[in-house]
Amino acid sequence: QSALTQPASVSGSPGQSITISCTGTSSDVGGNNYVSWYQQHPGKVPKLMIYGVSNRPSGVSNRFSGSKSGNTASLTISGLQAEDEADYYCSSYTSSSTVVFGGGTKVTVL
Amino acid sequence: QVTLRESGPALVKPTQTLTLTCTFSGFSLSTSGMCVSWIRQPPGKALEWLALIDWDYDKYYSTSLKTRLTISKDTSKNQVVLTMTDMDPVDTATYYCARLKMTTRDFDIWGQGTMVTVSS
């Protein structure tokens, strides 16, 4: 049950698009469609942004989108805004009925 | 409205056992498909999944911590309890409980978290 692999940091200018990758194995990311993404601002509780690989909960901006190819899932933020600056974590349900998180990615808006 | 709230000691000594309680409302843990999980986050570090209990009393644990963890529920009280034995300073973290639904298998609602420091 190793952590999913995410880049430590990603940055972009306002208005740009950025993509965060999340790489796992065939036992987690590649083996089901239960990948989710969470946004966490400093000192705050994680917030669900994407579930089921590409679905947005009610109230989440459509600037956030998710996808998956093989063992790698991705979160794309389009039209980057200052308020998007936060840590982002991917998560996947596994074939062992456990859950694994990624190491987190710090998004910086330049 | 679904809410979860963690409670427990803010400070524990090394080798002691930590007991945390998650009290929730707005859903029932006896409803098919409902689960509650514990997740922790050391200061400045990533989220780490710990354990999950489902509506049918099935329990699942982090492979690396399973020998130290026990999760249980009291459906009548709407509570889930996590115990972690042999606490160490590296276990210092904010501990969250969160709801997971088997239909989507994501953590849609989180508690505010409780900070636990392990120090003598």
Image: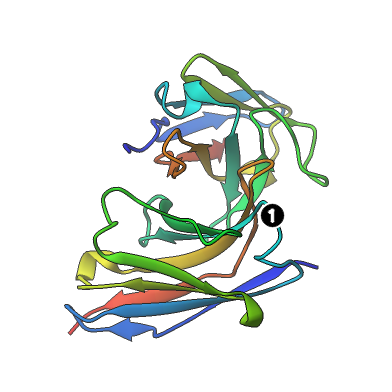
Give, as a three-letter code, the residue at label 1: Ser
Question: Which of the 4 image quadrants contains residue A95?
Answer: top left
Q: Which quadrant would the N terminus of chain A be assigned to in this image?
A: top left
Q: Does the image show residue B116?
A: yes
SS assignment at label 1: loop
Q: How many residues crowd around disc 1 within 10 Å: few (fewer than 14), some, or many (20 or more)? A: few
Frontmost residue, B98 versus A38: B98
Question: Which of the 4 image quadrants contains residue A41?
Answer: bottom right
Residue B115 in the image: state x and y as whole percent.
42, 74
Frontmost residue, B63 versus A106: B63
**Which residue has dot 1 on it?**
B32
The residue positioned 49% from the left and 23% from the top of the image is: A31
Residue B83 in the image: state x and y as whole percent.
36, 73
The residue positioned 62% from the left and 29% from the top of the image is: A13
Question: Which of the 4 image quadrants contains residue B103?
Answer: top right
The residue positioned 82% from the left and 45% from the top of the image is: A58
- Image mark count: 1
Which chain does the numbered disc 1 sit on? B
Residue B44 in the image: state x and y as whole percent.
38, 56
Q: Does the image show residue A44?
A: no
Looking at the image, is A97 positioned above or below residue A10? below
Residue B82 in the image: state x and y as whole percent.
42, 71
- Describe the colour scheme in one phrase: rainbow
Residue located farthest toward the top when viewing the structure as drawn? A70
Looking at the image, is A18 positioned above or below residue A90? above
Residue located farthest toward the front when viewing the structure as drawn? B56
Looking at the image, is B27 positioned above or below residue A85? below
In the displayed structure image, the side of residue A34 where residue B51 appears, left or right: left
